[in-house]
Amino acid sequence: MSPQAAADPGPRARRVNAVILATLVVAVLITTLAWALDGVPHDYVSLAVLTVLTLGTRVVRVRVVERVAVAASGIVSLASCVLVGPVGSALMMATTILLERGAAGWRARLFNASMGAILGSVGGLTYLLAGGPADLTTISGPGELMVRVGGRSSWRAWSSAWSTSPASR
């Protein structure tokens, strides 16, 4: 085998690298858009706490079936979209994936971190577009948050449907 043939990663590896690069570019673009729309992370203390908490919860995994495990970090990731905003959530998710111990190679970590950043940015932007307040001190509790995010018309429809259900008669 010639040295050139050994150095050539092959078409499959080049396609994988192209997908990883494309994912990284999309992550940077969406996080930059989130930064332009919402600014820097809302609370750096919460960002640090959520990052450490996520790193800790990734250690505990519940095996559902043979090859599927669920980490408790999912709920922390969702909370980060609300607590630290889209950029903070993207940073938290990407950082925890890059710092996670394991046998995954750098390409897998880079791809997973890019996907985490996309998830955090899109989740945070979706929360804001759904009417969620960026400043949580402006709301009085989870009920008000649900009404603001779900919309008053959604809340009225849900509450009227609940009050006319057979169980409430």
Image (cartoon, rainbow, N blue to C red):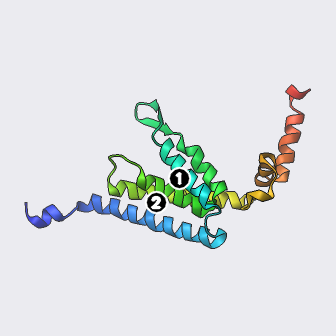
SS for callout 2 = helix
Q: Is residue 44 left or right of residue 133?
A: left
- Viewer-proximal residue among 126 and 110: 110
Image coordinates of residue 10 in percent, x first then y, are 23, 61
Mark 1 = which residue?
A: 51
**Res. 161 in view:** yes
Amino acid, disc 2: Ser
125, above or below 65, in the image: below
As drawn, is 104 to the left or to the right of 49? left
Element under label 1?
helix
Q: Residue at the location (83% across, 47% down)?
A: 155
Q: Quadrant of residue 90?
A: bottom right
Q: Residue furthest left?
A: 1
Residue 46 percent coordinates (x, y): 61, 55
Give the answer, above or below, for where 75 lies relative to 96: above
Residue for point 32% across, 53% down: 105
| Residue on which the image places disc 2 | 114
Q: Depth-wise, is mark 2 or mark 1 nearer the camera?
A: 1
Which residue is found at the position 63% from the left and 70% from the top? 39
Task: State the image coordinates of residue 98 (x, y, percent, origin top left).
Answer: 42, 55
Q: Quadrant of residue 21?
A: bottom left
Amino acid type at circle 1 is Thr
122, 9: nearer the viewer = 122
- The quadrant holding residue 160 is top right
Q: Residues within 10 Å of mark 2 (few under 14, many from 20)?
A: many
Q: Quadrant of the N terminus?
A: bottom left
